């Protein structure tokens, strides 16, 4: 991949990871993607669609294979959505996503209205109004620094300072999963727009993952995804000591809840192995990543073939465990660029018969070679 392409990918990464978004309020990301697809260089090659739930699909115009490869990512990130505006300049907001209760009271936030600069504020605390009914999200009282006209539906994000690059580390408000969105689009651009492959590679961008992959379930229940599709879900997943930042993208064999399609996971691992053989500077990892449950579990549950490739994520869901405070999320830029390389190789070579024999064939050949020892010879 040339330097210019990498510079483009990084620019998209920086733009996307700075966008305010929340489950059900992904409008700004959707608008960014719409503009990206409709750029003059892509407009004739790609087509953007939305399913009835607002999940986006992007594909090569006219593509119609029965076994497309989908790179999927979700467009939301844990954030508040305003539900009520008080007379005294305070707002009530529900939190859509998983963040420990200890991180809320006193933490700084930014209110994003439809227009104008963000307004600073601070979480006062949890509204305790008895046991919430099933499915009701926790609500918080928030004070705003300036008198403003907040509207129900406005997003409040954590205030985590300006995005910054520190060596190989990118510190931004929301890597999860906007870095996945950026990687999916970068790979699609290489494969389809710059014609690196004729394969039917598509992108599916889902909504409302942070409250239980609602958009992915809606897509998996029918209509949105071809039944023979191979799905590679992209995530930013909590880093552990054995899955560090900077050691390359992670071929994820499963998550907290389930394990992914063994055949597809094996083939994606083969693509990564081949890349590393061709270029020793290419790094990758193969891990479980049990820090959470990802959309691949939802796809698999509804009978689709799915696996996951993820980025090791620091300060998962903006929780800095060392300081016990809200902070920017971080990833390694090198992991991001290697992820794009891996996805391009997956798109270009997943159906290459030379990539690897199916697992059953490998077993049969091992058996043929070694069966003699069973006969006691
Ligand atoms: Zn998340």
Image: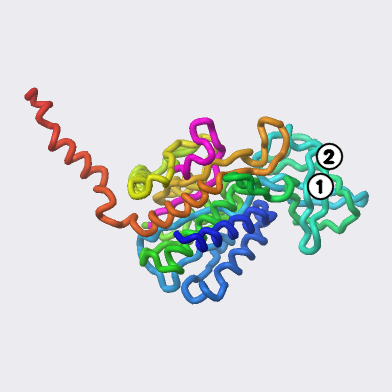
Name the secondary structure under disc 1: strand
Q: Is residue 274 visible?
A: yes
Name the secondary structure under disc 2: strand
The magenta stretch spans residue 235: yes
Q: Nearer the viewer, residue 233 or 162?
A: 162
Quadrant (top left, top right, bottom left, bottom right) of the C terminus: top left
The location of residue 100, given as percent across then percent down, is 68, 34
Numbered range of the magenta stretch = 229-250
Q: Nearer the viewer, residue 254 or 117?
A: 117
Q: Is residue 193 above or below residue 293?
A: below
N-terminal of the pair, mark 1 or mark 2, is 1
Dot in front, 1 or 2 = 2
User: Which residue does the numbered mark 2 point to in the structure image?
Assistant: 124
Task: Answer with left or right where residue 88 lies relative to residue 49.
Answer: right
**Residue that protrudes farthest toward the right in the picture:** 88
Distance between the alpha carbons at the discs numbered 1 and 2: 10 Å
The location of residue 366, given as percent across then percent down, is 18, 37
The location of residue 201, given as percent across then percent down, is 42, 62
Task: Answer with left or right where residue 39 lies relative to residue 352.
Answer: right
User: Which residue does the numbered mark 1 point to in the structure image?
Assistant: 92
Quarter where residue 229 is shown = bottom left
Q: Is residue 135 above or below residue 15?
A: above
Residue at 57% of width from left, 72% of height from top?
39
Q: Are marks 1 and 2 in contact (CB under 8 Å)?
A: no
Residue at 63% of width from left, 38% of height from top?
315
The numbered dot on residue 221 is none
């Amino acid at each position: 991949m040339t330097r210019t392409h990498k510079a483009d990918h990084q620019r998209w990464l920086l733009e996307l990871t700075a966008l305010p978004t929340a489950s059900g309020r992904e409008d700004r990301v959707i608008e960014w993607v719409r503009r990206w697809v409709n750029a003059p260089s892509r407009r004739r090659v790609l087509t953007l669609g939305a399913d009835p739930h607002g999940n986006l699909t992007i594909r090569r115009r006219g593509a119609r294979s029965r076994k497309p490869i989908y790179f999927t990512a979700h467009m939301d990130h844990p954030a508040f959505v305003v539900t009520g505006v008080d007379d005294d300049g305070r707002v009530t907001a529900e939190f859509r996503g998983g963040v420990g209760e200890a991180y809320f009271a006193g933490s700084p936030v930014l209110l994003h209205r439809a227009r104008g600069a963000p307004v600073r504020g601070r979480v006062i605390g949890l509204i305790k109004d008895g046991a919430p009914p099933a499915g009701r999200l926790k609500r918080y009282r928030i004070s705003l620094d300036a008198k403003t006209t907040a509207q129900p539906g406005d997003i409040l994000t954590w205030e985590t300072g300006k995005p910054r690059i520190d060596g190989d580390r990118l510190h931004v408000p929301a890597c999860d999963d906007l870095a996945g969105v950026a990687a999916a689009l970068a790979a699609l651009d290489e494969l389809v727009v710059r014609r690196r492959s004729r394969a039917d590679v598509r992108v599916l961008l889902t909504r409302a993952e942070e409250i239980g992959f609602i958009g992915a379930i809606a897509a998996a229940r029918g209509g949105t995804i071809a039944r023979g599709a191979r799905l590679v879900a992209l995530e930013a997943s909590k880093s552990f000591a054995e899955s560090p930042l900077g050691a390359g993208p992670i071929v994820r064999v499963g998550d907290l809840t389930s394990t992914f399609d063994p055949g597809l996971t094996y083939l994606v691992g083969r693509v990564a192995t081949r890349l590393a053989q061709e270029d020793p500077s290419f790094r990758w990892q193969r891990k479980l990543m049990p820090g959470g449950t990802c959309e691949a579990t939802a796809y698999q549950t509804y009978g689709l073939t799915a696996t996951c490739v993820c980025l090791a994520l620091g300060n998962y869901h903006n929780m800095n465990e060392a300081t016990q405070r809200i902070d920017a999320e971080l990833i390694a830029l090198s992991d991001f660029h290697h992820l794009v390389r891996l996805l391009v190789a997956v798109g270009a070579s997943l159906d290459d018969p030379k990539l690897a024999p199916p697992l059953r064939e490998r077993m049969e050949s091992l058996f043929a070679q070694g069966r003699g020892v069973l006969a006691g010879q």
